[in-house]
Amino acid sequence: MAANVDKQTTHCPLQKFTGGKCGFSATFSREKEYVKLSECTKNISNHLKSCKLPSGHQSKWEADVSSEGHLISYRCGLFSFQPDLKVCPVHRYNLGLLWKPARSCANPDHKGSKKVTKVVITKLSRYLFIREGIFIPVGAGLCSSCFIILNGKYNEEQIELENVSPDCIDKEDVESLDQEASYSLRPRTQKVNIRTIAVRNDIYAIKKD
């Protein structure tokens, strides 16, 4: 059941990842309740288009993100979707439909003055977050040089996985990868050394080895 923001005594769980104050959205002023991510079902096709992401609408490409709830989750670094996590109106729309990419390259290691020409899709954002410790939101822009470097790392790993025989894959390694995919790093504008894991709506901080 949704809870009115005025009656909430705690911040919404996503605030622990993104910071900022919980509250109302000026654009969607009639919405005054915390809702579950699974209940965030507004159409995101136009938003995906505005971010230069595949929208799935009148296109041969499948939508890069399947729902508003998933988009919100990914934008705060939770790539293991947790439908029961609740979000306040401010974080719902600031991470979702009202989010806009910066004009500058989103790579924290960016150098030079090249303009943004590429966009970060979900698969690349997730890979950089989990494997490289870099958080770049879905829909953020990259210059061509940074894109070649970061996307190259992702492509190299995919090639390595494709070239590995199933008989050579250790079951424990697979379980380790699955477990790692459930972790989320705390969003920062630079490389991070803290990991967080959300369990039953409680967020725990774990030092990275």
Image (spheres, helix red, strand yellow):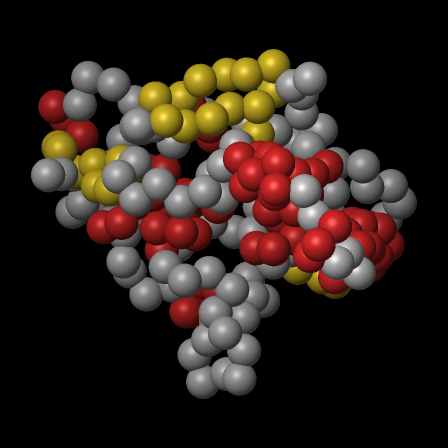
The quadrant of the picture occupied by the C terminus is top right
The quadrant of the picture occupied by the N terminus is top left
Asked if 64 appears above or below 4 in the picture, the reply is: below
Q: Residue at x 28, y 60 (%)?
A: 42
Asked if 185 appears above or below 36 in the picture, the reply is: above
Residue found at the very far right of the displayed protein: 112
- For the residue pair 96 and 148, the one nearer the viewer reads as 148
Report the side of 15 relative to 131 (left or right): left
- For the residue pair 199 and 38, the one nearer the viewer reads as 199
> Can residue 103 be spotted in the picture?
no
Residue found at the very far front of the displayed protein: 167
> Can residue 31 be spotted in the picture?
yes
Q: Position of residue 179 (x, y in %)?
A: 53, 35
Q: Position of residue 72 (x, y in %)?
A: 41, 46
Q: Position of residue 132 (x, y in %)?
A: 72, 37
Asked if 119 appears above or below 186 in the picture, the reply is: below
- For the residue pair 162 and 76, the one nearer the viewer reads as 162
Q: Position of residue 3 (x, y in %)?
A: 13, 33
- In which image quadrant can residue 25 be found? top left
- For the residue pair 118 and 59, the one nearer the viewer reads as 59
Q: Residue at x 62, y 36 (%)?
A: 172
Q: Residue at x 38, y 31 (%)?
A: 14
Q: Residue at x 32, y 65 (%)?
A: 43
